[in-house]
Image (cartoon, helix red, strand yellow):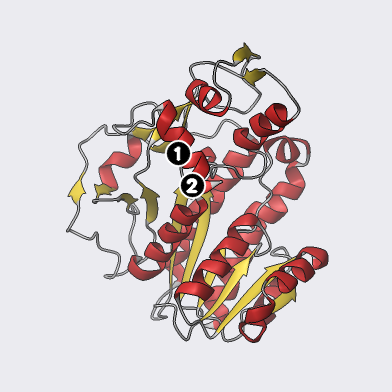
């Protein structure tokens, strides 16, 4: 599927882009991977890290806000993985116009560039925060998701489709709770702050996120949202796994934060199918005959929802300890 293909990754110097690049280079034989991002220093450090693959990598300085530059980068590209975004909730709240330019206008530019440059598949990374959003970042990502679904209306006779991959915070990712706890523990702390002791989260590793993106590249017909079946954990259990016997300080839920991560809402249930290892939310409106559900799955019951607090699979404290050793 990825062998002899040219892949462009927007925001390619981020944690996902670097890991996706490494995974593809070690599991497939791509023709070329184009790293499209704004930060020249991060591109330089990534180029140094991937020296042995220099003939396969191209580094494009560019911003998803710049349509003409994006079109230049998309020349000859088969697949786009859209990972570029302003992601920090406080930053988006304080800089809403900038977040719109990147997260919404940038999404529109990726769509236009793909349609105009003969790209075959586009997979956009989404977030649980786009589901029933309670902050500006989530609201903008919801709009972005809807744009990528609706982009399939513009395909016509072109051999291109747009799909979405949705998951929550990757375990250990920048700005998540694991690095926060780890820093406190390394500095001798014996008390860990938790915003609300009822809080739950999904556990997904970077590798699982990458594999879901590749599944979308292989299987998408247009407009689907792919969601992995992954275990949940209590944040209090994470604290105990990382610092046995620790004291917990409940500090109050932060603005724009949710108690639980939601991936499938009851409203989504009308078009959601369940498969062995994932769910797919199919678009409510379709624009071509290719946009048909994969009937190897089972349509979920009306009113079904999938969130970190109603999950069937839960991690124990010992499970979390083992995953911390494996995934961190």
Q: Is residue 116 visible?
A: yes
| 112 on left or right of 223 | right
Residue at which label 2 appears: 326
Q: Is residue 230 left or right of residue 176?
A: left
Q: Assign the N terminus to one quadrant of the image.
A: bottom left
Mark 1 residue crowding within 10 angstroms, few (<14) / some (14–19) / many (20+): few
Q: How many marks?
A: 2
Q: Position of residue 100 (x, y in %)?
A: 69, 49
Question: Which element carries disc 1, helix, strand or loop?
Answer: helix
From the viewer's perspective, is 290 left or right of 169?
left
Q: Nearer the viewer, residue 243 or 18?
A: 243
The answer to whether any part of residue 202 appears in the image is no
Residue 271 drawn at (x, y percent): 28, 47
**Are the two marked residues, 2 and 1, in contact with CB atoms closer than 8 angstroms?**
yes
Residue 157: quadrant of the picture: bottom left
Q: Position of residue 111 (x, y in %)?
A: 55, 67
Q: CA distance from mark 2 to mark 1?
A: 6 Å
Q: Is residue 228 above or below residue 151?
A: above
Q: Residue at x 75, y 39 (%)?
A: 91
In the image: residue 50, left or right of residue 202: right
Q: Is the residue 153 above or below the residue 4 in the image?
A: above
The x and y percentages for residue 105 are 66, 58
What label does residue 322 carry, if any? Answer: 1
């Amino acid at each position: 599927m990825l062998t002899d293909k040219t892949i462009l990754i927007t925001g390619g110097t981020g944690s996902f882009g670097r890991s996706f690049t490494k995974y593809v280079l070690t599991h497939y034989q791509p023709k070329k991977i184009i790293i499209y991002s704004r930060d020249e220093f991060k591109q330089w450090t990534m180029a140094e890290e991937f020296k042995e693959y220099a003939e396969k990598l191209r580094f494009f300085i560019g911003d998803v806000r710049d349509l003409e530059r994006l079109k230049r980068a998309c020349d000859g590209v088969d697949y786009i993985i859209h990972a570029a975004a302003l992601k920090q909730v406080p930053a988006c709240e304080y800089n809403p116009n900038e977040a719109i330019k990147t997260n919404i206008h940038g999404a529109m530019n990726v769509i236009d560039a793909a349609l105009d440059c003969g790209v075959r598949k586009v997979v956009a990374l989404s977030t649980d925060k786009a589901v029933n959003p309670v902050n500006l970042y989530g609201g903008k990502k919801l709009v972005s998701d809807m744009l990528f679904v609706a982009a399939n209306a513009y395909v016509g006779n072109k051999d291109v489709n747009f799909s979405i991959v949705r998951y929550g915070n990757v375990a250990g990712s920048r700005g998540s709770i694991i690095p926060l706890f780890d820093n406190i523990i390394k500095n001798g702390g014996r008390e860990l702050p938790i915003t609300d002791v009822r809080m739950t989260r999904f556990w997904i590793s970077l590798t699982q996120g990458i594999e879901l993106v590749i599944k979308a590249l292989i299987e998408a017909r247009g407009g689907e949202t792919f969601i992995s079946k992954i275990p949940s954990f209590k944040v209090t259990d994470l604290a105990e796994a990382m610092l046995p016997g620790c004291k917990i300080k409940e500090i109050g839920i932060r603005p724009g934060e949710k108690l639980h991560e939601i991936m499938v809402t009851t409203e989504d249930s009308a078009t959601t199918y369940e498969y062995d290892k994932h769910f797919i939310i199919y678009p409510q409106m379709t624009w071509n005959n290719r946009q048909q559900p994969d009937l190897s799955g089972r349509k979920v019951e009306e009113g079904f929802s999938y969130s970190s607090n109603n999950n069937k699979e839960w991690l124990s404290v010992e499970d979390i300890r083992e995953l911390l050793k494996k995934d961190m």
